[in-house]
Amino acid sequence: MKHALLSLATLFFLHFSATAQQPAGAPASTHHAEASRSVPSAEKLWTDLAEGNKRFVVGKPKQRELVPLRKRLAAGQHPNVVVLACADSRVAPELLFDQSLGDLFVVRSAGNIADPIGVGSIEYAVEHLGSSVLLVLGHTKCGAVTAACSKEKMPTANLQAIVDKIAPAVSRAGSSLKGDALVEAAIRENVHNSAHDVVASSEILRHFRDEGKLTVFEAEYDLSTGEVARLDNTSH
């Protein structure tokens, strides 16, 4: 077991060591996936997600043969879509978009924000697995955003780090708003901020976006209706 873990760590290190040797502004390596498969357009991928959400809303998910799919995917994964979502137990991207094994590369944290580990996970999906869409997904009544709106000091440094990351969205939501209106506005601002921050903090993601190989969508999930709405200031 120790030897297997060491071998895996070595492969990971070698892959990203090769990345570091590339010229500035270029990704580490060419997608292995791109050479062997056709990737749908970003709008087609969004349409597939939206149609899956409609099935989820009415309670009519696709029937899938998961055992053979699981066996096929054991050989490798090539998810087209990365989802940065909240860790809230009611917000499971695979379910609310009616997707299956291998369809989504999901990164989740309270408040759908990404620290360096989360950003690195997204980089891995885009640079190595060939994902071409990043969807940043917020949701109504988000507890993390609500806590940030309260402006109260959190009981631990770790919880404070979460609200500190969300605080700029609260400020941008507007000082005139109060209560639920402030929370809802801050939720949407936080989606925008997260989408911007993830790309701004990653040379790899900026490169793929600028080359037209990565599209960033922003959306909000309604806990009550089950519907996902695409937000207006989506970036490409």
Image (cartoon, rainbow, N blue to C red):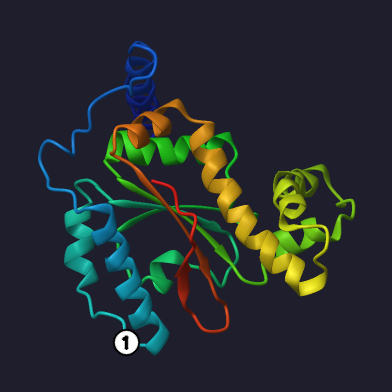
Quadrant holding the N terminus: top left
Residue 106 versus residue 208 in the image, above or below:
below
| Furthest-left residue in this view | 36
Residue 57 at what x, y percent from top left?
41, 84
Q: Residue at x 24, y 69 (%)?
A: 66
Say which of 121 and 193 sits in front: 193
Q: Is mark 1 on a helix, strand or loop?
A: loop
Question: Could you tell me if residue 102 is visible in this image?
Answer: no
| Furthest-front residue in this view | 176
- The image quarter containing residue 61 is bottom left
Q: How many labels does the image show?
A: 1
Residue 221 versus residue 156 in the image, above or below:
below
Residue 42 at what x, y percent from top left?
28, 53
Residue 232 at what x, y percent from top left?
48, 61
Question: Could you tell me if residue 20 is visible in this image?
Answer: yes
Inspect the image, locate mark 1, and give the three-letter code of the amino acid beneath it: Lys
Q: In this view, does 151 lie to the left or right of 123?
A: right
Say which of 11 and 86 sits in front: 86
Q: Is residue 156 left or right of residue 215?
A: right
Q: In this view, does 28 lie to the left or right of 194?
A: left
Other-residue count near label 1 (Cα within 10 Å), few / some / many at <14 / 14–19 / ≥20: few
Residue 218 versus residue 33 in the image, above or below:
below
Say which of 101 and 228 sits in front: 228
Circle 1 is placed at which residue position? 60
Q: Which residue is drawn at 70% across and 51% down?
A: 169
- The image quarter containing residue 71 is bottom left
Residue 86 versus residue 95 in the image, above or below:
above
Q: Residue at x 35, y 33 (%)?
A: 210
Residue 160 at what x, y percent from top left?
80, 46
